Image (tube, rainbow, N blue to C red):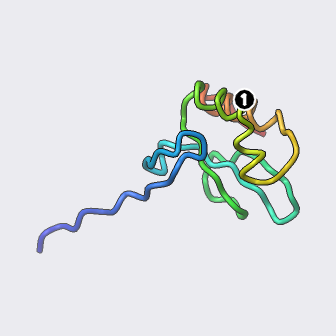
Amino acid sequence: MPKKNKKIPLRKCIVTQEMKPKQALIRVVKTKDGDVFVDPSGKKNGRGAYVSHDLSVVDQAESSQSIERHFQVKAIKEIYQDLRKVIQGEDVE
């Protein structure tokens, strides 16, 4: 029997609007309580949005307030700092 090719899940970056493999993106989650945080594991409960794994894209998202508009929340500077930490390989609380 021939092996079946596994389908690679694709997600769209909310900043660049590019479709990329899920592993090439960072997930940001908004819970039902209204908390917004970075989810490096990609498995937390809540509504997710994806941002490309690139510092220039994070800077672009911050200047255009993409995450705030996507989740309809007020300015959240910590999210952009956490995204930069994940890209640089640091742990996020």
Residue at (58% x, 25% y) in the render: 56
Q: Nearer the viewer, residue 57 or 48?
A: 57
Structural crowding at the residue carrying mark 1, measured as other residues with C-alpha within 10 Å and reported as few (<14), some (14–19) or many (≥20): few
Q: Quadrant of the N terminus?
A: bottom left
Residue at (12% x, 69% y) in the render: 2
Residue at (70% x, 42% y) in the render: 66
From the top left corner, tell me how far across and down residue 41 is, in percent. Answer: 61, 50
From the top left corner, tell me how far across and down residue 40 is, in percent. Answer: 63, 45
Q: Quadrant of the C terminus?
A: top right
The residue type indicated by label 1 comes to Ser
Q: Relative to residue 57, is residue 84 drawn left or right? A: right
Residue at (53% x, 39% y) in the render: 16
Task: Tell me the quarter of the picture where residue 78 sits.
Answer: top right
Q: Nearer the viewer, residue 86 or 48?
A: 48
Position of residue 22 relative to residue 33, above or below, is above
- For mark 1, what is the residue? 63
Residue that lies at the very extreme toward the bottom in this rendered image: 1
